[in-house]
Image: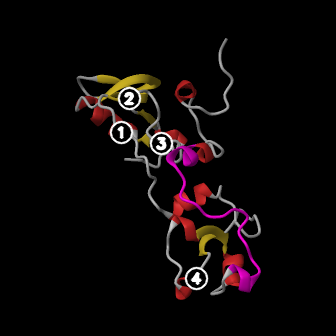
Amino acid sequence: MNAHVSQGGWPVLVLNADFRPLSYYPLSLWSWQDAIKAVFLERVNIVEHYDRAVHSPTFEMQLPSVVSLKSFVKPTTHPAFTRFNVFLRDRFICQYCHAHDDLTFDHIIPRSKGGQTTWENVVAACSPCNLRKGNLTPQQAKMFPRQAPFAPTVHQLHRNGRLFPPNYLHDSWLDYLYWDTELDP
């Protein structure tokens, strides 16, 4: 459950039972409403909280900023083959011209020539390069990706994800993330 929440929406960092984020990219965040529901269902522990509270006529609760699951969720060992994960593997860079904008994906060996939609045959490409390569093989188009496509590990995707930290990191999250943050003495 990954909620897309804004800085003003009081997002909650979700940690596994071992106090590691469920995912780094996208960062595992819940809305404050989902986090409070999980607290009442006794599925999570509150680790950190905001200086803001929610109220009912008979109850007040500080908004959680970091929660940890009570039960450990075994991380997947094989990442899903998705467009987003292809972009993440390729670091959001066109594998032909190194552009960062207007990304899509390209089949190295076109599907019409027997190429399949697999980790080993798909790369991130900008739309102009994808159109220019068209239905040609790399040899025919004289366009070769900067790196051979491969099936990444979860570790590789997490490593790449750390290169793209979110725009918003609350101070209470920093001890639980492995971004380039200065450590206290």
- Of discs 2 and 3, which sits in the foreground? 3
Residue 71 to residue 160: above or below: above
- Which three-letter amino acid code belongs to the residue tagged 1? Lys
Q: Earlier in the sequence, mark 2 or mark 3?
A: 3
Between discs 1 and 4, the one toward the N terminus: 1
Q: Which residue is mark 1?
A: 74
Q: What's the residue at 44%, 57% (across, down)?
A: 80
Evaluate if marks 4 and 2 touch, with contact meaning CB atoms under 8 Å apart: no
Residue at the disc numbered 2: 68
Q: SS class of the residue under badge 3? A: loop
Give the distance between the C-alpha atoms of the residues marked 3 and 1, in whole angstroms.
12 Å
* Residue beneath disc 4: 110
Give the CA distance from mark 4 to mark 2. 45 Å
Query: On the image, numbered disc 3 is attached to which residue?
Result: 23
For the point 37% across and 24% down, the residue is: 46
Q: Secondary structure at mark 2?
A: strand
